[in-house]
């Protein structure tokens, strides 16, 4: 059976809420809203004012975790104190309750039975305080993963700093300062991301929804201090209950576009074997690459 993916070409806060309502779900209890809050200096991330109506719609708490890339990149989200200051500077705390889920040790460790690469996922322990999750993804490229969407938000986004190191190194180390010397190849890394994403999706099974916004389509992620400017025109917003289907639908919209920047964007995706994350997630049973796109 094909998964449903709702789509609109209108990009606005109101359109995000409209697509969420089209899913026909009500996320129960305390809702974790996973966003990408943007690295210091990044120009492409989606601002809190854009997400505000959607977060208020579900009465959610914005959640984030520290990064694993250390000081070498110039980023500041790898330490709790500087990360919290950036969340304030970027305006997240102005509008929302914000939970930096791995601000305090210890991490929570979830098993990944049947994982392709990883046998466990290390996450910010506060994730267990939530009953459901809304994944708000800015779909764009990524320097290591090829692209970033719903699956990356589940995997890298929910992992603690140590968990991020484990994913990037395909289980070789949880030391964030060793990660980049032991970065996995472009088969093991996508599979490790799929494994980690699977554990989060399973934890919230039946109580999780996904929205991808195809805006500011750079080949670089919002984690980049200096990101390349967008190479394509904005495309639209998608919503689904299936993280595999929504990411596949975004890739298909890029591939099917006549935008002159398409080749540059897909070179980033393909050179990093990015679609293998979608393939691996489908093989784990997270969702279906076959979908019905319903335009609103």
Image (spheres, rainbow, N blue to C red):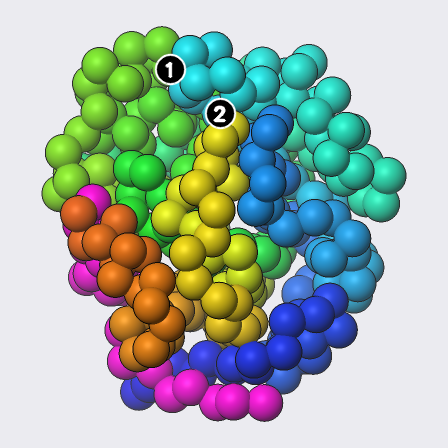
In this rendering, is residue 108 above or below 134?
Answer: above
Camera-nearest residue between 27 and 244: 244
- Residue 230: % across, % down: 47, 53
Q: Is residue 243 left or right of residue 100?
A: left
The reply to whether dot 1 and dot 2 touch (C-beta < 8 Å) is yes
The image quadrant that residue 11 belongs to is bottom right
Task: Measure the C-alpha gap from mark 1 to mark 2.
Answer: 8 Å
Instruction: Residue at 28%, 56% (x, y): give it.
Output: 264
Considering depth in this image, is 221 or 110 the residue closer to the camera? 221
Q: In the picture shown, does residue 143 fall above or below 230?
A: above
Query: Residue 274 in magenta?
Result: yes
Q: Is residue 187 left or right of residue 18?
A: left
- The residue carrying mark 2 is 67
Between residues 231 and 174, which one lies in front from this camera angle?
A: 231
| Quadrant containing the N terminus in the rendered view | bottom left
Q: Position of residue 79 (x, y in %)?
A: 58, 14
Residue closest to the far front = 260
Residue 66 lies, in percent from the top left, at: 54, 25
SS of the residue at dot 1? loop
Q: Kindly tell me whether residue 69 is visible in this rendering.
A: yes
Q: Which residues are magenta?
A: 272-296
At 70% from the left edge and 70% from the top edge, which residue is drawn?
12
Say which residue label 1 marks: 176
Question: Is 86 on the left or on the right of 280, as rendered?
Answer: right
> Is residue 287 rendered to the left or right of residue 33?
left
Q: How many numbered markers are drawn? A: 2
């Amino acid at each position: 059976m094909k998964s449903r993916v709702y789509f609109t070409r209108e990009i606005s806060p109101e359109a995000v809420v409209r697509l969420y309502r089209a899913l026909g779900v009500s996320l129960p209890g305390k809702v974790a809203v996973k966003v990408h809050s943007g690295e210091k200096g990044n120009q492409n991330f989606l601002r809190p004012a854009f997400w505000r109506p959607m977060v208020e719609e579900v009465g959610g708490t914005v959640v984030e975790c520290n990064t694993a890339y250390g000081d070498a990149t110039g980023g500041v989200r790898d330490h709790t104190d500087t990360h919290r200051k950036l969340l304030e500077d970027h305006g997240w705390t102005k509008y929302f309750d914000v939970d930096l889920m791995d601000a305090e040790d210890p991490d929570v460790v979830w098993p990944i039975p049947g994982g392709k690469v990883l046998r466990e996922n290390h996450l910010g322990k506060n994730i267990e305080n939530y009953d459901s999750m809304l994944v708000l993804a800015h779909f764009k490229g990524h320097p290591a993963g090829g692209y970033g969407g719903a699956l990356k938000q589940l995997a890298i986004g929910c992992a603690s700093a140590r968990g991020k190191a484990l994913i990037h190194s395909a289980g070789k180390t949880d030391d964030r300062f060793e990660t980049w010397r032991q970065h996995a190849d472009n088969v093991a890394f996508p599979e490790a991301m799929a494994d980690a994403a699977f554990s989060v999706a399973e934890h919230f099974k039946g109580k999780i929804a996904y929205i991808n916004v195809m805006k500011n389509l750079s080949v670089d992620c919002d984690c980049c201090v200096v990101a390349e400017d967008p190479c394509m025109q904005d495309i639209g917003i998608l919503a689904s209950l299936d993280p595999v289907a929504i990411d596949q639908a975004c890739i298909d919209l890029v591939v099917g576009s006549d935008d002159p920047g398409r080749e540059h964007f897909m070179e980033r995706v393909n050179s990093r074997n990015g679609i293998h994350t979608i393939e691996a997630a489908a093989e784990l049973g997270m969702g279906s690459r076959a979908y019905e796109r319903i335009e609103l």
